[in-house]
Amino acid sequence: MTAHTVEVPEDNAVFGQTTSAFASFGYSAAVRAHGLLFIAGTIGRRTDGTIPDTIEEQTEIALRKIEEILRLENLDTSALVDVTSYHVDIRRHLPGFIEAKKRLVRAPYPTWTIIGVSGLASPGLLVEIRATAAYPDPPR
C-alpha cells in the first residue's frame, strides 16, 4: 500500500501554534491512501492554542481546519464522503453545532455520524470532528 502523509506547515494561518500537536501526540493531520484522504480528529482550538467557550466557535474552527487540510490536497468540502463528530454534553450543544455546521457544510452532503462522549483530550473542548474525503476519479 502506498500512503502519503499530509503535512500542515508550521506557519499555517488556519492552524497557527496548534500544529505542534501533531509531533507532541505522534499523529498526522491526514493520510492519503487508496484514493481516500483520512483526516484526523480536529478540534476547535484557536491559532494561539486557546479554547473558545462556545460550541459554535469550536465547530467553526474545527471545520475550517478540515477545509484547510482539504485545500492543501487541492480538494474542497464537496470531496467529503464520511464525517464523525464527537460531542461533550451532546443534548445541550447539538443545536449550536448544527447551526455552525449549516453555515459551513454545503450539498452534496457526506454521511455524518454524531456521537456523545464524556470528555475529550483537554478540558473545555466540546467537539472533535474526523473526516474522510475521496479524490476525484481519474479521467477515462
Image: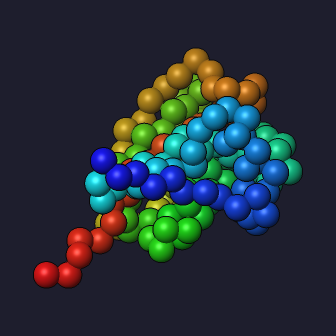
For residue 124, above or below residue 74: above
Q: Nearer the viewer, residue 103 or 121?
A: 121
Name the spot of residue 2 as percent of width and height, x first.
35, 52
Left or right: 99 as drawn, with respect to 112: right
What residue is drawn where x is 86% and y is 51%? Answer: 48
User: Which residue: 62% across, 50% down?
Assistant: 62
Q: Is residue 14 above or below residue 26?
A: below
Locate residue 46 relative to residue 58 in the image: left or right.
Answer: right
Camera-nearest residue between 114 and 1: 1
Viewer can see residue 52: no
Q: Nearer the viewer, residue 136 or 103?
A: 136
Q: Quadrant of the C terminus?
A: bottom left
Name the residue located 56 percent from the left edge and 68 percent from the top edge: 72
Q: Please identify the quarter of the rendering in which residue 42 is found.
A: top right
Q: State the residue lying farthest toward the bottom.
A: 139
Q: Residue at x 49, y 68 (%)?
A: 73
Q: Is residue 106 above or below residue 39?
A: below
Residue 95 image position (x, y, % from top left):
54, 43
Residue 57 x, y percent position in the rendering: 70, 51
- The outermost residue toward the top is 118
Residue reaching furthest left?
Answer: 140
Colouring of the image: rainbow
Could you say where residue 78 lies in the image, as x and y percent from the top left? 38, 68
The answer to whether residue 79 of the structure is visible from this angle is: yes
Total labels: the figure holds: 0
